[in-house]
Image: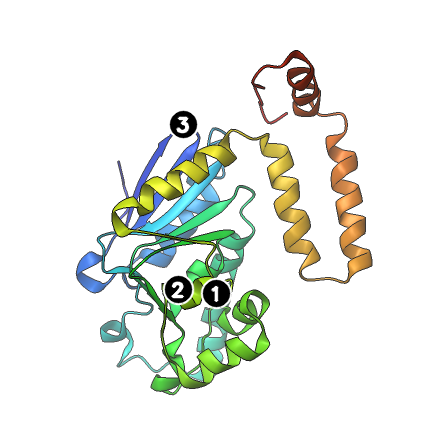
Amino acid sequence: MSDYETLLYSAENGVATVTLNRPDRMNTLGGSMKQDLWHVFTDRMLNDRSIRCVILTGAGDRAFCAGADIKERAGNRPPPAEYFARQKFTHELTRTIENFERPVIAAINGVALGGGMEIALCADIRIAADHARFGLPEVKLGVLPAAGGTQRMPRIVGESKAKELMYTGRMMGAEEALGCGLVSQIAAQADLMETAMTLARDIADKPPLSVAFIKNAINTGMQVGMDAGLEYERLGAAMLIDSDDRKEGMAAFLEKRKPNFTGR
């Protein structure tokens, strides 16, 4: 089911699947894709409380997303001030995905390059097909990663590794990505979506308020000092202490049954 020009969307059993759907263009970020992503995250999924986890992937087996559509952009040279203003939307989109109150799993089914890599960096968890390749090759085009890559990649793989990748623009394979912490799992292409769905359903079974506060505490803590992070953690714990889900979790544990979490 989909009513987007560049995305496929489906939802079942608390898990939404968003598929970047421009396979003839390597799922590049062209056409209305940025606007479609904005709508699906800020409207469709945000307002559907039944969604408890999101899988973000690409159509086909060649590309998660190969970044900007160079054919569309090659002749586009806006004035620096105009570009600076327009890029604000791209940053707001990536922050929206990164801070979406429910977990996002990127199932990376092929190349994730440039802006596609930067979209994947916004996910909470990244799972790669064994043939996937990753890179921020903007330097080869005389530009830099401008959708958050210079900020998110060092926080995930470390400063030295991130600089090496961005200074050279080289691509790395799934095993190297696993070794530096860019992805948490590798799966055969045929098993990628099943692997991602199994994890998503496991997360969807957990109390959504707890998951949301955990995500927010980690994301906030990565941006501030230890003391401020601990204060946020303490606040989250206090907010959850009287929730229906905490009461249900405690009762289910004592009664040796599966809990029924409602997100309240």
Q: What's the CA distance linking mark 1 and mark 2?
A: 6 Å
| Residue appearing at x 66%, y 19% in the figure | 253
- Please say which color scheme the image uses: rainbow
- The secondary structure type at the circle numbered 3 is loop
Would residue 2 be seen by someone viewing this image from the given angle?
A: yes
Is there a contact, CB below 8 Å, between mark 1 and mark 2? yes
Label 2 amino acid?
Answer: Glu
- In the picture provided, is 140 more to the left or to the right than 220? left
Res 118 visible: no
Position above or below: 113 against 200: below
Q: Residue at x 51, y 44 (%)?
A: 103
Q: Residues within 10 Å of mark 3 (few under 14, many from 20)?
A: few
For badge 3, the amino acid type reads Asn
Extreme residue toward the top, this view = 255
As rendered, which of 133 and 118 lies closer to the eye? Answer: 133
Q: Amino acid at mark 1?
A: Gly
At 56% across and 51% down in the image, what residue appears? 99
Residue 2, label in figure: none
Which structural element holds mark 1? helix
Question: Dot 2, crowdedness within 10 Å: few (<14), some or many (≥20)?
Answer: some
Rendered location of residue 156, percent (x, y): 55, 65
Q: Which residue is mark 2?
A: 175
Residue placed under numbered mark 3 in the picture: 13
Q: Tell which circle, 2 or 3, labels the residue nearer the N-terminal end.
A: 3
Q: Which mark is residue 179?
A: 1
- What residue appears at the point 51 percent right and 62 percent down from the top-left corner? 181
